[in-house]
Structures are given as C-alpha cells and as structure tokens.
Image (cartoon, coloured by chain):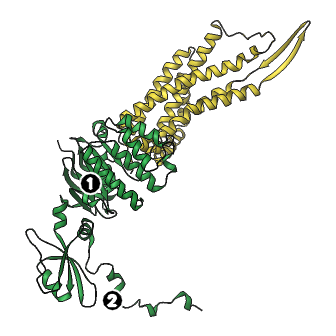
Chain colours: A yellow, B green
Amino acid sequence: MGSLLSLQLAGTLIAISAQNGSNGSFGNLTLNIQTFNTDVIVVLTLVWAFLAPLYLTGRDSFEADMVFTNDRITRHFGNIGYLALLTFAGSLTAVMACLTVLLLPLLGSRPVLFPEFGQWGLAGYALAMFTVLLSYSLLLMGAGYLIGTLIGLSRLLVIGLFLIGLVLLGVLDDAGLRWLGRFSRFLFGNEQPVILLIKSASSSAVLFLAAVLASNRQEAGS
Amino acid sequence: MKRLEFDGTEKRFLGTSALRELTLTLEGDKIIGLLGRNGAGKTTAMKLAAGFLRPTAGSVRAFGEPAFNSLFASANTIYMSEDVRFPYTLSLGGILDELARAYPNFDRALAGRLADYFSLPSDSKHAALSKGMQNTFNLIAGLAARCPLTLLDEPLNGMDAAVRKDLTSVLLKEFIEAPRMIIVSGHQLQGLEELFEEIAILHKGRLLRHEEADSFKGQFKKVSGPASAVSAATERHTVILRRPSLPGMEEAIVELGPGMTLFAPAGTDLAVSALSLNDAYIAATGGTEGGIDRVYADPSGENKPQNRRHPANRP
C-alpha cells in the first residue's frame, strides 16, 4: 500500500505542476481558466494494479510463504483477498487524489467556478470514476496475477503461450482481430459503470481461478 | 498415528532420480538423524516431508495425510534449511512475530531471548546477515515453533565452533522442554551425533539403513596393529576399509555381523576401538579399501613426479 500511495502522491504532484492556465477578460469580468489533467494518477494506479500481483506471485514470494502455515489454495485466497482489498482502497485514494487536484483552486482567495459534473454532481462524478477505476484495476490485477503465477511456474510456458496467441491471431487473420474487438466491446462498451464493474469483476475472477488451477501443484525449493 | 511415512517414494528432477523407492516410517518423539553423503537425497526427502515437493511416484504422508498441499500437515510441520527464504521486507523481529502468528505453539519470548543471546538484532534484515548468522536464526525459529514434526536440514552449516556447541545444547534443551520429532539431516555431525536416538542413512537416493543410533554404531569397529595380526583378526568379518598406517602396521574398519563380537587377543599388540557415529556412517556409505591413498598410489606409474613438466622448468 505504501508503494501505491507513493505513486499516487507523485502523480498528484505531477498533475498539479503540469496545469495549464489561460486568462480572458469580458468587460469587468476576468476569467482565469486552469486545466488540470489527472490522467497520470489514474495511469500510475493502473500500472501498480498490474505490477503488484507480479511481485506477490513471484518465486521469492512463493518460497517465503511456504515457511508459514499454508497450502496452495489458502495462499491464493489470502493473496487474492489482500489484492482485492488493496485495489478497492487504491481506487478510492486515486479518486481522492484526483479530486484534491480538482479542488485545489479553492485554496486561493478568488471565487471559483467549477465545470458541470452531470446530473449527479461532483459526488456522482467521483462515484462513477471510482467504479470505472476499480473495474480496470481488478481486470489488470487478475491479468497480472495469472501472468505472474505462470512466470513462477515456467518462463518458457509464458513465452510459449504468448507465441501461440500470436500464431493463432495470424492463422485466424481478420477473424481473430474481429473476435478480439467483439470481446473488448462486450467488456468495455457499457453505458453504465456498474455493468462494467460486474463484467470486470467476473473476468478477473476467471483469471484468478485460472491462476489457482495452474499452480495448485507448484513445488517449492525445487 | 504414524508421524511420517514414505512409501515407495521416488523423486525425479528433469529425468534424474534424486530419491528411489524410499520406504521409511518414523514415529514417536525423538531426535532422528537423516544421514548421507552429498547428493544422497537428504534434502529432497526433507522437502518431500515438508510438503514442498510432490513425489514423482509413491507417497509421502505426514500425520496420516499426504504431506504435499495439506494445511493440517503444514500447521504441524516446520522445515528450516540454509536456503529457506523469508519475506525480505520483514526484520528478524517481524519474522518471529509472523511465525508466532502462524504456528500455535511458537514460543516468541524464547525466540527473542535466543536471538539476543546470539547477537541477532531484531531490526536487522535476514538477507543482511552472514551465512552462519542466518543459519543460527533459522535454527532458533525452527525450534521455537515447537511443531510436532521439526525438519532441520544441515542446521549447523557455516557456524563457528562456539555457536555450534551452544546451539547443540539449545536443541537438546528444546527437545526436553517440548518433546517432538526432530529430524536433523546432515553430513557434518560433530556435536550432534550424541543426540540421535535413531538414524536413517540415505545413499545414492536409496535407504541404506534405518535403526537405533547406538545399535548402528556398535556394528563397526576399528582394528589396528601389525598387518598380519589385523588380517587374522578380521578374516571372519566384513572389512570395509583397510589401509597401512606405519611400516608393517595396518588399520581396518570392520562391520560385525549380527551377534558377532571382536576382541583383541592378548599379546598381539592389536587394538580394537569403537567408531563414532560419524565415522561409522562414512564407513557404511563409502569406505573403500585403500581410501584416498589409492588415488595417489598411481599403480600405472605413468604420472610419476619426475615425468611431469613443472612450470618452473619450462623454457
């Protein structure tokens, strides 16, 4: 969690320092327009969501876990629960960091006019952002967990699977890419953030399950 | 309930057999020596018992359950070796705290006192310690866990003589304080051999012997004296090792058959002595007539020193 908060803090500082400003005068009214881009916070959070499970499923981590009381399934459930909790907390802190950047002008002495946030206001905007970020984080976390687990089993296996995937796409030609596009639209083409969350959580559950099944016979110290 | 049971166990790594047809049952609260030369399969057997490895054939059961992937067996077993890894983010104190959370019988206070005694700072990282200190910490952690099945793989490697002596005492005191099955593997037994009640010897991946330590040790004798007297005294016994000592003198290590004894006849200048467990197991696992002297004897004569080109003689 410390690493995530450090990344988000760095992202916040980058977002604040990279703001753009422009001035405009309309009679007696002077408008100072400040544009903040908080994408960097979101991107760093997503990168962390992918990398954290790679560390947690690595060979060193597995060997260290084996010193303590556990079996493979218990270890996986512990890891997945821990990661899910971190993702939830990390998405929350990311949204808070984005809002902090957005609300920063309030600290000044001049009156601030906020942009429109839709019918649900700032709270609705924050909730939607949290839901979307949580969805993508869960998905990346599941992918990272599966890839990390497979790397722990055999690097050659991962390279082999990657090559098989490329060959399949090549063999299937346009059909393969169309299938990928359809799958992406199904996953990401949603009007409602909550639908995205349900689909992402289900997909990451499948990825986690694949990791559990793949490594349930993993040996330590071999 | 049998504490640990290997039944026709085989373990292969990339086609190479590390353990073959191992059938061995261990029961009761005792300190057991798992002995063998390098590559005999000791570590593989220990890791199979700890549930780290999955047998290629046969089975390994701990507490009546398959040792591999059993939460019950894991909760009652601890395995410590010099290559065991701890989370590198934790300090030594943190590792002991986590072990205390994982193992219900873990004596955290004792572990802390022992760590202090052996000058292991609780805020140090395990990876920052020397090899000997890492092993000292591992042994403290392994013993303080007080698991019914405690597996210690080469526990005294890399330690200086004083620490070895102290830790041998710790091992004995811990066993008396909390009796359990402690299996100690190794090939450097000095200091430990008196603690073993039972031994199992592995040789080239197979079980060579499994018996009481004293009984095993008593089967081997060292006979030394005039060569003719040694030959006469040992002719009815299995001679494992025979080598000249002084001119006209010889010493031999013999293995006595069941019910046989060996005495030094009066007036023959023959000395018969018992072997230490260490020497006995070395004799049982690899003593060859002539020993290392045969390598240097070079009966072919092709590599006599005068025939060699010494670097200093090169033009």
Q: Is residue B266 above or below residue A132?
A: below
Quadrant (top left, top right, bottom left, bottom right) of the N terminus of chain B: top left
- Residue A88's tag is none
| Residue at screen point 66% across, 8% down | A118
Choose between A180 and B197: the one closer to the eye. Answer: B197
Residue B74 lies in what quarter of the image? top left
- Residue type beneath disc 1: Glu
Provide the secondary structure element on which disc 2 rests.
loop
Residue B289 lies in what quarter of the image? bottom left
| Residue at screen point 65% across, 8% down | A121
Find residue B40 and report its horizontal and vertical position in percent: 30, 62
Q: CA distance from mark 2 to mark 1?
A: 40 Å
Q: Which residue is mark 1?
A: B10
Q: Please tell me how crowded label 1 is: few (under 14), some (14-19), or many (20+) other residues with Cα within 10 Å.
A: many
- Residue type beneath disc 2: Pro
Find residue B48 and report its horizontal and vertical position in percent: 30, 49
Choose between B141 and B289: the one closer to the eye. Answer: B141
Quadrant (top left, top right, bottom left, bottom right) of the C terminus of chain B: bottom right
Q: Is residue A207 above or below residue B8?
A: above
Most extreme residue toward the bottom, as rendered?
B306
Q: Which residue is mark 2?
A: B299
Find residue B208 and report its horizontal and vertical position in percent: 21, 63
Q: Are marks 2 and 1 in contact (CB under 8 Å)?
A: no
Most extreme residue toward the left, as rendered?
B259
Q: On what subunit does the disc labeled 2 rest?
A: B
| Residue at screen point 77% across, 9% down | A113
Q: Nearer the viewer, mark 2 or mark 1?
A: 2
